[in-house]
Image (cartoon, coloured by chain):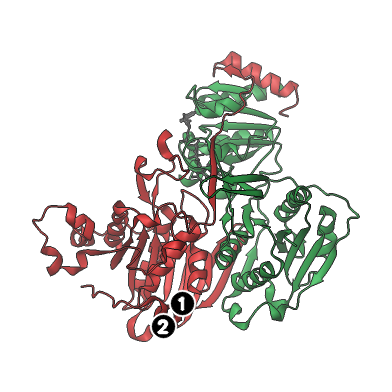
Amino acid sequence: MNNISVYLEIEDGIVADVSLELLTKGRSLANKLTCKLEAIAIGFKLDGIGAQVFPYGVDVLTLADDKRLFPYTSLPHTSILVKLYKEDKPQIALMGATSIGRDLGPRVSSALFSGLTADCTSLEIGDHEDKKAGKTYKNLLYQIRPAFGGNIVATIINPDQRPQMATVREGVMKKEVLDKNYKGETKTLDVAKYVSDSDFVVSVIERHMEKSKVNIKGAPIVISGGYGIGSRENFELLFNFASIIGAEVGASRAAVDAGFADHERQIGQTGVTVRPKLYIACGISGQIQHIAGMQESSMIIAINNDPSAPINAIADYIITGNVEDVIPKMIKYYKKNTK
Amino acid sequence: MCIVPFPKFVASEIVNRKYKLMYNYMGLKIVVLAKQVPDTRNVGKDAMKADGTVNRAALSAIFNPEDLNALEQALRLKDKYEGSTVSILTMGPGRAAEIIRESMYRGADDGYLLTDRAFAGSDTLATSYALSCAIKNFPKVDLIICGRQAIDGDTAQVGPQVAEKLGMPQITYAEEILSCSKDKITVKRRLEKGVELVEGKLPMVVTVNGSAPECRPRNAKLVMKFKRAKTVSEKQESSQDYINLFDTCPYLNITEWSVNDIKADADWLGLKGSPTKVKEIESVVFQTKESKRLTPDDFDMESLMRELISNHTIG
Ligand SMILES: Cc1cc2nc3c(=O)[nH]c(=O)nc-3n(C[C@H](O)[C@H](O)[C@H](O)COP(=O)(O)OP(=O)(O)OC[C@H]3O[C@@H](n4cnc5c(N)ncnc54)[C@H](O)[C@@H]3O)c2cc1C
């Protein structure tokens, strides 16, 4: 009753990292609230899912296994979640801020009139006092995300509606096995009771899923370029430096929006979260949405021609100068001293 | 072309109606949802109000980029299927009429501005409710196209929520609407990790990705035709000189709708109709590290690289 529910994203029978990260977070929230952690798997051939998710501390795994449920389409997955949430009344429902979660979450929240907060960077439990209404709410989900306009963070709550829904990007939460022998119960749904034929009006005729070519998340060094890089051509300088020192190239949203770099390289709240041992921010001002995705880097070097750029506050080394002057020198002296 | 005002329907009648496509007879009726957004690249200190909502007045406003991609998809369908029309629907303050004119300059037929104090403070769900009520004001809609997300929130929630409120299916992340014939629509989707080709039936809500083709530029003839297009409020503010122009050229009228015009229930709008509340807004003060300041000169650069190499951060 009033548990925490995590929607599992599954491709080729494998549960996505973002879902496992959410299970880890969900487990710690469930401990605080002394409730159960539930996982919902909707798809086809789900036999192997239990073994993958129970070690993360799942108490109840619900399976909706039907040929028509893979690949994902919006309506049948929505119908199942909406009916399940109405029956089980979870207090919190989490999903990944992925192509699927961002298609499914809003539709489910609309059907249930429950609020949904996208791209949270932190989730906590806390109370809320509504002084006007003279009401106190205990143990709400604080959905924390950067707010737009200056370096500010907003705490969003859903005082009255359930479930409290939130999406989180991959890499924001850490995934951690709780106990490899943890055992929960498995429930199998009678899918026909949860979907209707009219849910299948959209069909997938072709599908090509690719493993991402860039692996920014796993790179030990990330060199990121911002709007200050100035052009796609100038980004070549960063790629060049990266290939010499074995790094990956990242970008700010302003650089992505300007077409200097591809979206899959975007670092930040609405991009990838990285924790490399070295992060070099080149021509990036350091807005909260960017910092949210890189502040846990072990060492940060900021290269910016503005001596008071906000990024400097979190940098270990502040190089005040032009990127186009600094990087060639870093390359030169790297080569000279590694010979 | 003149715009014949659409007959008004009682909301409940429209809720019950099945949207039927009469493709061969009338072409497609397309509604594009667009938003005027603050230019998030140029935000100042006074960008937020005390209640945690964005102070739009303090920011320069632009056409939300992905809504322009959506408009282009709509205009391509209009080019392809004779008799089709494209209407722009936007919710926002009076000045949001700017993006309606901008759409007309590129080929949209008419525009609707949803504006009312009661909408202020709406979260995505209350916004979607208002937009869905407005869409029900149209006698027939085959296709609703909007941008995947707006740059001031990046939530990507409004498209799917409008679809749900209208009881329509949705295709998100569209890169190209390949065809839209009779009652079938075929769309190429660009997902974070791949591409998909999907097929569905009309009516449908489609949200368009930034990877879709850019919007065509303004057309000089259309700029001439529509540059004086105005909402009622704008007409009242402007000089009286050419006020009868709007009778002789009814296409210059941008329809303005209030809460009453769309028969929306005020309980579902604004802060009241928004299940999510902003509890608090905090300025982030970064824990300033003990940082070393360096110049780009050779001495500093060489010692930095030596240090990074010797402590095995690099190499
Ligand atoms: C909902 C939402 C989500 C967002 N998500 C993200 C996200 O995930 N990731 C993200 O990065 N942003 C995100 N943003 C945008 C973010 O708020 C900032 O606008 C963005 O990070 C700014 O990018 P920037 O630092 O590259 O550009 P700018 O702020 O324009 O900074 C450019 C910097 O380059 C410096 N510079 C210029 N020329 C040179 C030179 N020759 N050499 C050295 N330095 C130079 C300038 O001094 C300046 O500091 C989001 C915004 C919103 C509203």
Q: Kindly check if marks 2 and 1 are in contact, taking CB atoms under 8 A apart as contact.
A: yes
Q: Residue at x 45, y 39 (%)?
A: B50
Quarter containing the C terminus of chain A: top right
Closest to the observer, A158 or B37 = A158
Quickly name the residue at label 1: B203
Marks 2 and 1, Cα distance to the nearest angstrom?
A: 8 Å
Give the residue type at disc 2: Leu
Q: Residue furthest front?
A: A134
Can see residue A53?
yes
Q: Does label 2 or label 1 sit earlier along the sequence?
A: 2
Residue type beneath disc 1: Pro
Q: Which chain is red?
A: B
Give the residue number, with chain letter if any, for mark 2: B21
- When the figure is inspected, residue B18 is found, relative to residue A77, above or below; the finding is below
Q: Which chain is green?
A: A
Chain of the residue where label 1 is placed in the rendered structure = B
In the structure shown, which secondary structural element does the residue marked by tag 2 occupy? Answer: loop
Question: Residue A238's x, y, as percent?
Answer: 57, 35
What is the x, y in percent for residue A1? Answer: 75, 62
Q: Could you say where residue A207 lies in the image, as x and y percent from the top left?
A: 63, 68
